[in-house]
Image (cartoon, rainbow, N blue to C red):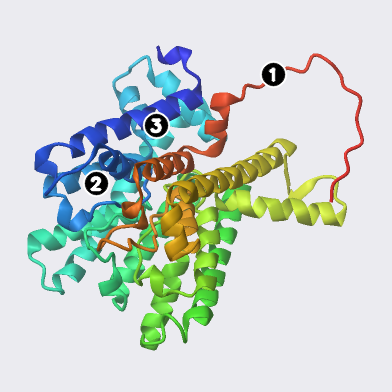
Amino acid sequence: MLKNLKPYQILLSGYIGVIIVGALLLLLPWTRRGSLSLTDAFFTSTSAVCVTGLIVKDTQGFFTPVGKGIILLLLQIGGIGYMTLATFFLFLLRAKSSFSFRMTMSQSFPELSIGNIFRFARLVILITLALEITGTLILYPSFLKYGFSNFKAFGHALFTSVSAFCNAGFSTFATSLTRYRGDIIINLTVMFLIVVGGIGFVLLQDIDEKFFLKTKKKLTLHSKAVLIFTTLLIITGAIIIFISEYSHGFAGFPLKEKILASLFQAITPRTAGFSTVNMSILAPSTLYFIMLFMFIGGSPGGTAGGIKTTTFFGIFIWLYNYLKGNEQIIFLKYRISEETIKKIFSIFLLSIAIIFTSTFLVMVVEREGVKTHGFLPYLFEVFSAFGTVGLSWGSFHHKFVSLSADFNIPAKWVIIITMLAGKVGVLSLASLIIEKKKEEIGYVPGKYVVG
């Protein structure tokens, strides 16, 4: 049956299947403390599989250890990518359907040949486990210092490490990491896991081959671009947030906490969702800037969402070359193909369209809330959902949950679909309704004025 499905159909149906199973498991009575509606179960499962972190129930207080374990499993599947896991295990089992999954993965990673897909999947799993275990071992003694028992400290460390590397933003702490805003070890560990998970496994493979396997292979254009763009965003973001909030939201913080909070808030919107400060204390200008970061997201082939760093900066690379009058699009002495440029603009425009539509629908069904609390919190929630970030203004009626907890059922389903769109990718969703057709007729060029 898989042979008859196209790659994007396998990708989307797989994620929907995992979400459904996750929702049904969360509805079991021993996973939670209290009632859980079908919509809220699907919301939580989607948020976990799409590694978003928006919550309508307090993860710490509402879900039992079994429930937290299910959420942890779902976000691990979403972080690594169910396609990677399926390819790996089906290949080990020598299943015939493994070829269909390898074909789908090759669509997501065109630089890999079909024969190298299994090795890549194995590398992804090994890197993920190694970094998550390392993060757990570093965080465990740090949480012990705050009076937790051995079992609870380990549980917090494991959940935080997996969630951070998967760029999920789910936390076993009701107030995320605000209590640990000044803890250097916890901050640096979580930030490192977020960045490494977000830069993409393609870059990590390049680094592995060049520095650990000692091959003569040079870093690819993609890897160089990701390193440059990621560093630029982190440094620029931290400086802007530090200046913007120095005498505003961070006014009462010691200098060390101001620096750590600025750096953390520059990293977490792309697209982890952890926070060391309450979003509601930040200035509107800072929130506007954070929304841009949530829109950009991480890098291709990683655990992060958003339109990706290479897409966002690709627009400026094209613009620079266009204004220079270059016939070819050149970056770092490499030519970027016309097909790549088309994908960049397609992703950008379709993403804007999804955010605009989702925001409009949320505002329609949450009209009274928008009138009372203003437009910004709802726009922020949609950007967070699409970027699979998990940052939120917070509920106006409940403690320790996202603004989505205040939404009625239709608005929650808008956010669910938006999270799924952000995770699967706009081009995959567009492929569901758009089929490429061969043009049999040659048309005469027409005059079309722009600008």
- Residue under the image location 38 percent in, 50 percent down: 52
Please state which amino acid type lies under the numbered disc 2.
Answer: Leu
Distance between the Cα atoms at labels 1 and 2? 42 Å
Choose top left, top right, bottom left or bottom right for residue 264.
bottom left
Q: Quadrant of the N terminus?
A: top left
Residue highlighted by disc 1: 437
Q: Nearer the viewer, residue 123 or 309?
A: 309
- Residue under the image location 88 percent in, 43 percent down: 449
Q: Is residue 445 left or right of residue 125?
A: right
Sequence-wise, the earlier of marks 2 and 3 is 2
Does the image show residue 305? no
Residue highlighted by disc 3: 83
- Numbered mark located on residue 72 in the image: 2
- Residue under the image location 48 percent in, 64 percent down: 374
Does the image show residue 409? yes
Task: Please tell me how crowded label 1 is: few (under 14), some (14-19), or many (20+) other residues with Cα within 10 Å.
Answer: few
Judge depth for marks 3 and 1 and give the one in front.
Answer: 1
- Numbered mark located on residue 36 in the image: none
- Residue under the image location 23 percent in, 40 percent down: 37
Secondary structure found at label 2: helix
Q: Is residue 239 left or right of residue 330?
A: left
